[in-house]
Image (cartoon, rainbow, N blue to C red):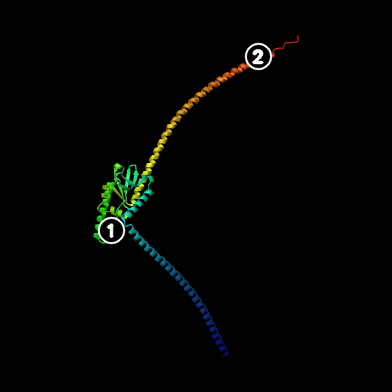
Amino acid sequence: MDLAIILSAIGIATIAIIYFTNRRSADSSLAEWLRSMDKRIDNQTSQMLQAQQAIYSELSKSAKSIGEMSEIGKSMKDLQQFLASPKLRGGIGEQVLKQLLEESLPKNSFNLQYTFRSGNKVDAAIKTDSGIIPIDSKFTMENFKKMMSAETDSERMAHRKLFIADTKDRVDEISRKYILTDEGTVDFALMYVPSESVYYEIVNSEDSLMDYAYKRRVMPVSPSTFYAFLRSVLLSFEGQQIAAEIKNIQNNLRAIHTETSKFAELLSTLQTHVNNTYSMMSKVSSQFSTLSSKVDGVQGIGKNRETRINDLPLENTDS
């Protein structure tokens, strides 16, 4: 009985020990898991804070950029109002034309504000072997702007007709005032259109504005097509320069050929003189050898006589 009680007590104690041991291990694992979760939550919170700060920074930059764009838009509006004057806009067009010419062609190959005998001045004139190419840059754009900003089709059509009329008037004026072959111009002139969009409208016009201009020997050009035209003119200038250099080389070769012929004649004369001199030297040398032999012979005779005289017996003066 006592043994059974003791064994029961031991069993209960063993179960209790196992229970408390397992519970302590579970509590330790739970604590470790809680610490890990707390660390991960801290990391995620830190990352979220960093992301929020980055978002706030980008929003601040965007707001600043929007403010700057607003200021730029306001400045552009002010600039458009400032350029509303055709005179100011024309002056800028002339300045751009001048810059294109200065960047593309030699300085002495063009003139700005070229004056004809009539007193008319063209904005620029390119000097070529074929003649002077006049360039006009005073293009009116008021009706084009009104056409583009019109709110109704009827307004757009009305301003389009005025734009076409302005363009034709400009073409007629250029053809009449600047194509003057008797003053050395070529048989055409350039109409510089300072806007690609306006040039595109002229090219694609249903009223055949390009044909109208070509029939009057006026060539419309935009900034891009004018630059291409200047490049072709520059190549022409370079070709002329190469041709001039080739001509100089040919002239130099002719001069060298002439001098070579003269030198050959002098060399031939000198060779003749040298040959004559050599021949004369040979004769002189031969004569000198003959003379030297004769002199040696004369000297030999003198020596023989002296030897014979010395060989004669001396007389006895005592007897």
Q: Is residue 187 above or below residue 29?
A: above
Please state which of the two labelled residues, at mark 2 or mark 1, is closer to the viewer: 1
Q: Residues within 10 Å of mark 1 (few under 14, many from 20)?
A: some
Q: Position of residue 313 (x, y in %)?
A: 71, 12
Q: Position of residue 79 (x, y in %)?
A: 35, 59
Q: Is residue 106 visible?
A: no
Left or right of 68 in this view: 145? left
Please report the residue visible at 51 percent of the width from the left and 24 percent of the height from the top: 277
Quarter holding the N terminus is bottom right
Q: Position of residue 53 (x, y in %)?
A: 44, 69
For mark 1, give the secondary structure.
helix
Name the residue furthest bottom.
1
Left or right of 244 in this view: 318? right
Determine which residue is flagged by label 2. 305
User: Which label sits on residue 146?
Assistant: 1
Name the residue furthest right.
318
Please report the residue visible at 60 percent of the width from the left and 18 percent of the height from the top: 295
Left or right of 19 in this view: 173? left
Q: Is residue 299 above or below residue 163?
A: above
Please report the residue visible at 37 percent of the width from the left and 42 percent of the height from the top: 240
Quarter holding the C terminus is top right
The total of numbered circles placed on residues is 2
Q: Is residue 81 visible?
A: yes
Name the residue furthest front.
119
In the rendered structure, which amino acid carries the disc numbered 2?
Answer: Arg
Q: Earlier in the sequence, mark 2 or mark 1?
A: 1
